Amino acid sequence: MRILIASPEAVPYIKTGGLADVAGALSKEYRKMNEKVYLVLPLYKKIRDSQIRLADTGISMNIPVGDRVIKGRILKNHQTAYFIECDEFFDRPELYGTAEGDYSDNASRFAFFSKSILEMCRSLTFKPDIIHCNDWQTGLVPLYLRTLYRDDAFFKKTAALLTIHNLGYQGLFPASHMRVTNLGREFFTPEGIEFYGKVNFLKAGMIAADVLSTVSETYSREILLPESGFGLDGVLKKREHDLYGIVNGIDYEEWDPAKDKLLPANYHFKDLSGKALCKRELLRMLFKTVPKSREEQVPLIGMVTRLSEQKGLDLVLQAVPEILSFGVKLVILGKGDERFQKSFRELSGKYKDSISVTIGFDEMLAHRIYAGSDYFLMPSKYEPCGLGQLIALRYGTIPIARRTGGLADTIEDFEPLTRRGTGFLFADYTASGMLDALKRAFCVYTDTEKMQSMIRNGMQTDFSWKRSAQRYLELYKTALQKRRE
């Protein structure tokens, strides 16, 4: 099958969130499966400035964006990844915006990218069977296939799948930006891409893609409801029979505690002694003292997260005094909203012996938190899939999470009588609900046999990409069938 994965970001080239892991990992998995797969990304400044070797294909394109024609070029890395070069749009410090807000011309930037994807296919004479679009930045591609390229024989057999990674991000722009799409005003309607007086790029993909997917089965059901649909639940309800949930995976070569070079000690589910050494070193590194044996015996809770309201951080702020009353330590790594950054900085100053907060992202520290913590806290308000809990399970760190989205699909709530389960879940989005789950977890912590059993259960779960990639291949076939109908 000829597959084109179109994404605004992908590892190993550029990453701001889990979307990059998905796009990069799927590409890698399909190559292992001998599928003909290409990846296309914008050529951001950070990619150009990196050590990645890029080759100029010598192909340039003239792309209409509103009443302008913007020039783009195609570069490549090896034979599998292509990059759309346009310095006017992508030679910037960040991908989508700065701390002050989104770039004001994001509509033009990603309308250009979406058109460039299709023109690139023509220029390379690559006829994809499927274009796998990801999030609002590529949402116009399916609609362009059905409109501007409807009569183009080159794309006659090309189907489109749109994966919604997070419905909270939709690509909303003022009505005046409709002109940069080069679509007629007849599409600026409630049945088209108009959304409460604005242009909605994600909605464009939702109404035009042959098949829709999101990143867990539970989330695919949640977004059909008004409380989780961000205003698009009605649109999704109309396409319910074309909407599928496929849980994300993780790269088990990158995330392997038995081989991880960023850890002070390695371990596996048959020998957990290295995990205790990882905890000791994490305590020493973050709390700047040689940990006493008593400190090593208290529960250590880790969080590697984006500091945003979605992640349930308001619950953590409310509950900090009661959490610390259990005699635990809390380690947080992340960046995001300034109000959360400020609040957690203040907490780490007030409780410096019990709370460590690192603002930013540190790859080595992230690995060490996953390995050295006893528990991994994810009290999310909503969570389309979540990768943190999958990594935590792999590293023998027990997740404590809210029963929502992908967290509900990937964590089995612990049942003390049968000793089955891989984590602790709570349903109500309240500080008391989260505290109840923490209390259940701390009860198990005092029972070494139960604790070891949970750790091993988690480490042996399979959330590798192979299973997810196979499900996407089946979904591509479904999209192709719908295209033929």
Image (cartoon, grey):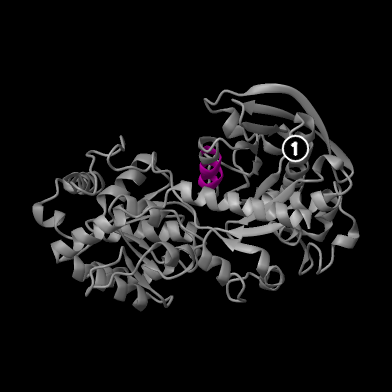
Residue 336: x %, y % from top left? 49, 54
Q: Is residue 324 left or right of residue 346?
A: left
Residue for point 10% across, 51% down: 292
Dominant secondary structure (helix, strand or loop) of the stretch shown in magenta: helix
Q: Is residue 199 left or right of residue 263?
A: right
Q: Name the one closer to the observer, 319 or 152.
A: 152
Residue 285 vs 310, above or below: the answer is above
Secondary structure state at the residue bearing disc 1: loop
Dividing the picture into quarters, in which one does residue 261 lie?
top left
Residue 167 shows in this picture? no
Label tally: 1
Q: Is residue 178 left or right of residue 100?
A: right
Residue placed farthest to the left in the image? 293
The residue to which callout 1 is attached is 127
Residue 289: x %, y % from top left? 17, 46
- Image quadrant where one finds the C terminus: bottom right
Residue 278: x %, y % from top left? 22, 45
Residue 252 vs 471, above or below: the answer is above
Residue 416 vs 109, above or below: the answer is below
Is residue 390 found inside the magenta-colored segment of the image? Answer: no
Residue for point 72% across, 55% down: 481
Residue for point 86% across, 61% down: 187
Q: Is residue 256 left or right of residue 132?
A: left
Residue 143: x %, y % from top left? 79, 54
Residue 444 shows in this picture? yes
The part of the chain drawn in magenta is 20-28
- Label 1 crowd (10 A; few <14 / some 14-19 / many >=20): some
Residue for point 72% across, 71% down: 238
Q: Name the one closer to the observer, 250 or 293.
A: 250
Q: Hey, what amino acid is under mark 1?
A: Lys
